[in-house]
């Protein structure tokens, strides 16, 4: 059983930092929301690493927003709804496509330099399932790094934002169903209570649930696990996007080979050199990611291979080096030249469509607790995220969160809360436990799933619940507990959804079933698992 808190505490014995707003996470969602909130409030921005270490930093493709005269919010909405496979919130998508362009201009005003052509017009690219070129990028394929650079510089020079790097949020504290702040482990291991009127979870994704992921090692499902323990609803976590094309090469990490490479004309070939995507979908290499990922897995199984090839050698050297400088240089480190070589790739966990359920202003079912970015589930992505919508979602709903926070009354004095349960000493090696969990998820809760595999995974996860009964004091241990929490939620939802839709594929239920399953699975600590009709 997952406990309410993973560590014992007594607030009256802890140092206390009071502020108006606490933002947890330093990706685009956290940085942008902190900047917006600082216009009227004092903000504490808490990052478990440095400001330049987040999922956003690795985002290559770009940010989707309507800027071209040939494009429209209606077209962007249509593409998003189609990719979401019937489970998007229409209202949330409508908010995204209409407010995205204005938020994009704010990023530019904050100093983000998106790429322009020789005439000074923003360069737009197209990715899978987009009907138009509407994706802005920066430094070719380093969009996330450029956005983080610009926002971080603004944050560091903002007198109303206190940045706490290398601080780890263990849990948020609640009193009578209302979030009153965060329990933070400082770099020296001592605890600190940050008391605030509003807490924003912008902790990023959960890629470390799997052995192979495009995410950095900080993506440990912290926001989902923290919110779940705090009583908030968790929604749609069975829908996990496995990026079709992560580098698969001896000695190299699973580095993301952006979908924009296929957007610029790259094709997929199996190990026999045969192009295969025309056999799987009319949009070929630009089909939705879940379809491309499953097609790759099918070809790997058919040809008894552990990878396929991505081929862009038919494009010019100038285009490749200009458009994909980061990817080109990275591959070159391992002796692979995109100009002349086919790049070996395979699917890897990339993005979690579900997360902490929020309303249209980012508020969770726990009062004063908000979620933004990949940690959240706004309803925009449905069963499958449309490429490059994630950065747009972060700023659109970050802005809306701040508008809601403006309306909150300041937090009144809170009682001296405490929590304690019996915990064992000398926990097992939590690094080894994490690796065991990652392999379990890869085998049984990956691209293709079945009842037998999911049940095996759930039984093993429930056996691992004993880890909550130990006293832990390290960031790695708490991250492993967060991954264990998220793994249980994901596996339960995947077992319950007896159909295939978007990022969830069951080999024993290979078809989509709108009659029964056009609805959501919601999980909470108090109410367990329940179904909810789609909006």
Image (cartoon, helix red, strand yellow):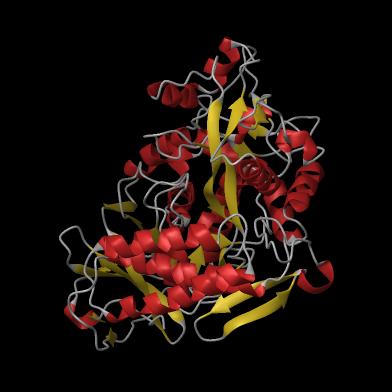
> In front here: 43 or 419?
419
Specify whether 163 is left or right of 509: left
The image position of residue 504, as x and y in percent, is 65, 60
When the figure is inspected, residue 429 is found, relative to residue 173, above or below; the finding is above
Which residue is at 84% across, 71% downward? Answer: 515
When the figure is inspected, residue 124 is found, relative to residue 174, above or below; the finding is above
Specify whether 160 is left or right of 86: left
Which residue is at 23% across, 64% downward? Answer: 474
User: In this view of the protein, can residue 79 be seen by the observer?
Assistant: yes
Q: Which residue, as the protein is rendered here, is positioned at the far left?
A: 188
Specify whether 343 is left or right of 8: right
User: In this view of the protein, can residue 41 be seen by the observer?
Assistant: no
- Quarter of the image with the C terminus is bottom right
Which residue is at 56% across, 49% downward? Answer: 395
When the figure is inspected, residue 12 is found, relative to residue 209, above or below; the finding is below
Q: Which residue, as the protein is rendered here, is positioned at the far right?
A: 515
Image quadrant assignment for residue 57: top left
The image position of residue 206, as x and y in percent, is 47, 57
The image position of residue 364, as x and y in percent, is 54, 71
- Quarter of the image with the N terminus is bottom left
When the figure is inspected, residue 530 is found, relative to residue 363, above or below; the finding is below
Q: What count of labels does the image hold?
A: 0
> In front here: 64 or 315?
315
The image position of residue 13, as x and y in percent, is 17, 80
> In front here: 452 or 316?
452
């Amino acid at each position: 059983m997952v406990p309410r808190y993973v560590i014992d505490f007594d607030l009256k014995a802890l140092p206390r930092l009071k502020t108006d707003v606490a933002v947890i996470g330093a990706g685009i969602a956290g940085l942008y929301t902190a900047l917006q909130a600082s216009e009227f409030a004092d903000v504490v921005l808490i990052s478990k690493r440095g400001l330049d270490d987040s999922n956003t930093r690795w985002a290559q493709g770009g940010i989707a927003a309507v800027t071209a005269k040939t494009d429209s919010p209606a077209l962007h909405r249509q593409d998003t709804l189609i990719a979401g496979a019937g489970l998007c919130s229409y209202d949330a998508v409508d908010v995204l496509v209409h407010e995205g362009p204005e938020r994009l201009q704010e990023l530019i005003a904050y100093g983000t330099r998106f790429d322009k052509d020789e005439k000074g017009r923003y360069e737009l690219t197209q990715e899978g399932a987009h009907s138009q070129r509407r994706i802005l990028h920066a430094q070719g394929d380093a969009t996330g790094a450029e956005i983080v650079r610009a926002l971080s510089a603004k944050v560091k020079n903002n007198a109303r934002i206190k940045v706490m790097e290398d601080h780890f949020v263990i849990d948020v504290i609640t009193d009578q169903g209302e979030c009153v702040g965060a329990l933070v482990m400082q770099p020296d291991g001592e605890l600190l209570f940050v008391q605030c009127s509003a807490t924003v979870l912008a902790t990023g994704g959960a890629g470390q649930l799997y052995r192979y992921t495009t995410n950095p090692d900080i993506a440990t499902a912290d926001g989902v696990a923290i919110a779940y323990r705090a009583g908030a609803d968790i929604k749609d976590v069975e829908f996990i996007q496995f990026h079709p094309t992560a580098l698969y090469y001896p000695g190299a990490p699973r580095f993301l080979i952006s979908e924009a490479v296929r957007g610029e004309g790259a094709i997929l070939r199996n190990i026999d050199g045969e192009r295969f995507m025309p056999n799987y979908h009319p949009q070929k290499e630009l089909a939705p990611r879940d379809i491309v990922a499953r097609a790759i897995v099918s070809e790997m199984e058919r040809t008894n291979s552990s990878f396929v090839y991505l081929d862009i050698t038919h494009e010019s050297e100038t285009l490749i080096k200009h458009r994909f400088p980061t990817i080109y240089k990275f591959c070159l480190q391992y002796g692979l030249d995109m100009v002349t070589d086919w790049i070996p790739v395979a699917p890897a966990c990339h993005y979690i469509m579900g997360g902490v359920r929020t309303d249209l202003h980012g508020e969770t079912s726990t009062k004063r607790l908000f979620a933004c970015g990949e940690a959240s589930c706004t309803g925009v992505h449905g069963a499958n995220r449309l490429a490059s919508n994630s950065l747009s979602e972060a700023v659109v709903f970050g802005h809306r969160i701040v508008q809601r926070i403006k309306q909150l009354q300041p937090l009144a004095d809170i009682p001296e809360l405490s929590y304690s349960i019996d915990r064992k000493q000398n926990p097992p090696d939590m690094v080894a436990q994490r690796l065991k969990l990652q392999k379990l998820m890869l085998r049984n809760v990956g691209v293709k799933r079945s009842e037998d595999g999911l049940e095996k995974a759930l039984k093993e996860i429930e056996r691992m619940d004993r880890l909550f009964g130990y006293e832990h004091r390290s960031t790695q241990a708490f991250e492993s507990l967060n991954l264990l929490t998220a793994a249980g939620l994901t596996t339960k939802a995947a077992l319950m959804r007896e159909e295939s839709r978007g990022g969830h594929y069951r080999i024993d239920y290979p078809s989509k079933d709108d009659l029964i399953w056009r609805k959501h699975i919601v999980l909470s600590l108090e109410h367990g698992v329940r179904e909810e009709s789609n909006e």
